[in-house]
Image (spheres, rainbow, N blue to C red):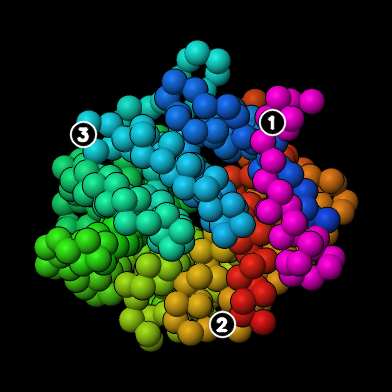
Amino acid sequence: MPVSEKTYLLQALCDETLTLGKPSWRPMLEYVAKLHERCIHPPCQWLEYPWEEIGPGYCYGPAFGHWDLIHAVLDVMPSEPEHACHQLLNYFANQQDNGMIPGSLWLNGTSRVWDPHAGHPPVWVYAVDQVLGQAGPEFLQQSYAVLQRQIQWFEKYRQAIDGGFYYQDIVNKTWESGIDDGVRFIHLPAEPMACIDATSHLYLLYETASRWATQLGHEAISHQQQAERLRDLIQNQLFSHQTGFFHDSWSVNDPKIRCLSHEGIWPLVVGAATHDQAMSVIHEHLLNPEHFFAQHPITSLAICDQHYTMRMWRGPAWNSITYWAALACQRYQQDHAAVQLLEAALDQTARQFDLTGTIWEFYHPHGQSPLSLARKPTSPFNSPCSDYLGHNPMLAMARRFDELT
């Protein structure tokens, strides 16, 4: 038995699973709670507190960080607030002097490996907002300082030529966006142009910085102005009236290379879309069985897209993205849509758990075996990882389902 199983218990989280969602989900939810316990490692020289890895089945593990960590934090809140805060403090501790927060840290005994040039989607601020009620003003001040430095890094190193922000995937395909080899990167611009996800994420950072600054009694107008500028850009330059969807700036007006990839939901997640734009995305796309609403929603690429296939990020469903899509629906008062997405994803995840006894990195959108999916055909790891926690905030999804029903 791994030492982490003997040492670290999340009893409140395990107890919570007995009350969440449908009874048919609870064996799966209990397994996920126990998986959190299995993922905890003792503190090390780089991480002051016990830390959660991405998942014991992750093919490149053990690793800490990326947006996988944020999904794990959301999953353990509110049952385990101290553990959630400790993960964020571990995360903050690795911010570099220039403000960059590394994507993943690969930790093995006394060694630490990470890419000094690649960050990752900065959705951590959403997790901080979830723990603030139990963390206190000192944690907010610390989080705000980290946020300011990260914004400065994005402004210096990820500013696009057309006013938005980009992930360096469009420069060197290092998958900073977290979307390894997505179809939107098949046709790339000659210069760094605005990515719909990166630009939306920076809107989230500016909007959050404005709120936190106000709470702390600091000047907020500069953050407000930047958020408003990006909101205008997203609404007026990154939305296609032809598709009723959001796209990257280099493809939004070019039907030949434009695709319906899940990244188009981010303006809704962060609240940068207009009401009409949001209704188009939700009702014409997210709930459309010919687009994203498969048996296991949401597909990472619309079913009707010419590039749709059963390969990582080109069709299969990721529960973390379904979670963000549900938040997007809820933000625009479409609770029924959120419930539909959450219930279908939880039903299908529980079904596959009953069949296989594990939690998969991503899922077949039409209910078939995850092992029938391709991960990375050119690598030794061409199947979804089992016991993969980072993209499976199943307890958070069940919690939100209960709140909405």
Please state the horizontal and vertical placement of residue 191, each as a whole percent of the image: 21, 45
Vertical order, 340 against 13 (above or below): below
Q: Nearer the viewer, mark 1 or mark 2?
A: 1
Q: Which mark is residue 98?
A: 3
Q: Kindly identify the residue that appears in the image at 60 percent across and 29 percent down.
A: 41
Extent of the magenta region: 1-26
Locate the C terminus by quadrant. bottom right
Residue 93 visible somewhere in the drawing? yes
Mark 3 or mark 2: name the one nearer the start of the chain: 3
Around disc 2, counting alpha carbons within 10 Å, would you say few (fewer than 14), some (14 to 19), or many (20 or more)?
some
Of 340 and 253, the residue lying toward us: 340
Q: CA distance from mark 1 to mark 3?
A: 36 Å
Q: Which mark is residue 7?
A: 1
Q: Badges 3 and 2: C-beta atoms under 8 Å apart?
A: no
Q: Which mark is residue 335?
A: 2
Vertical order, 18 against 363 (above or below): below
Q: Nearer the viewer, mark 1 or mark 3?
A: 1
Residue 210 visible somewhere in the drawing? no
